[in-house]
Amino acid sequence: MMKRSISERTADILIYVFIGVLSLVCLIPFIHVLAVSLSGNSAVIANEVFLIPKDINFDAYVKVFNDASMMRSLWFSVFITIAFTALGMFLTICGAFALSRKRLKGRRVIGVLFLITMYFTAGTIPDYILMSELNLINTAAVLILPLAFSAYNLIILRTFMQNSVPQSLEEAAAIDGCDDFTTLVRIVLPLSVPVLATLALFYAVGRWNTFQDALYFITKSPLKPLQLKLYELVNAAGAQASVSQEIAGESMQAEEVVKSACIMFATIPIVIVYPFIQKYFVKGVMIGAVKE
């Protein structure tokens, strides 16, 4: 084994330090919010909480779990995320497989049409008019259908199927009498698990964190997803700043504890899911990085 030079070891140390600092920048806000959510109101009022909770209690979480509207928004968000991800993956797989077949006539033109949608959009007002004309306002469908297809994800999966799935396997399957559907299910998809897991994560996290479409298209409380409820909670906390100074201090800080608990409440589901698909995600993001 070759001995590493001092400059190489110094570069490694600097890289590790940079990655460590970057990780702390990402983790510290999360740890701070967790600490605030577990702390007592008096400690938060005194600004004594940073990374370690003081006067630990779970009153804020009890309040969140006892809030029927918050729990309803949670389960509705879970349903929307699952349905959105399933539909998005179905459309992406079907489109990518078709566009990856060389015998599809006009596939280059179709690919360009999909690519154009990544650069141009009509805007919020035309979107609202369209949703209104389709009678999708205040329905669960308005949170699923408009964003359920991603041209970016389609291009990633199409490129993978073209470059990483051996054509010889598909030819052998055709000789054995397999049709396109059988080839897709039994050959292409099993070989595409890493990229499929990565795209599913993109769809799920994107839907879970999005609230602007709900803000524009949803006015009925039972249909408000969790992220919109958090948005309204933050706005309500900001509105309390106009209350008399004597009341505002304690009320705002008490609300800060509950708000932090709600943020953790919305973050934990994704944090729990991620480790189960992390190995696929790492493989998926590396696809195409190295080419033999």
Image (spheres, rainbow, N blue to C red):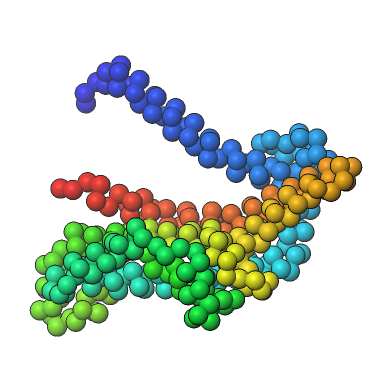
Q: Nearer the viewer, residue 111 or 65?
A: 111
> Taking the image as drawn, is residue 56 in sight?
no
Q: Is residue 6 toward the left or the right of residue 103 in the image? A: right
Q: Residue at x 40, y 62 (%)?
A: 121
Q: Residue furthest top?
A: 6
Q: x%, y% of residue 2? A: 21, 23
When asked about the image quadrant of residue 232, the answer is: bottom right
Q: Residue furthest right?
A: 246
When asked about the image quadrant of residue 3, the answer is: top left
Q: Residue at x 46, y 63 (%)?
A: 123
Q: x%, y% of residue 244? A: 87, 46
In this view, 45 is above or below 149? above
Q: Residue at x 57, y 66 (%)?
A: 216
Q: x%, y% of residue 27? A: 55, 40
Q: Nearer the viewer, residue 112 or 162?
A: 112
**Image quarter (top left, top right, bottom left or bottom right) of the N terminus:** top left
Q: Residue at x 18, y 81 (%)?
A: 178
In this view, 252 is above or below 97? above
Q: Nearer the viewer, residue 143 or 37?
A: 143
Q: Nearer the viewer, residue 259 or 273?
A: 259
Q: x%, y% of residue 49? A: 73, 36
Q: Is residue 15 toward the left or the right of residue 82 in the image? A: left
> Taking the image as drawn, is residue 162 in sight?
yes
Query: In the rendered picture of this protein, how many numbered marks are placed on residues?
Result: 0
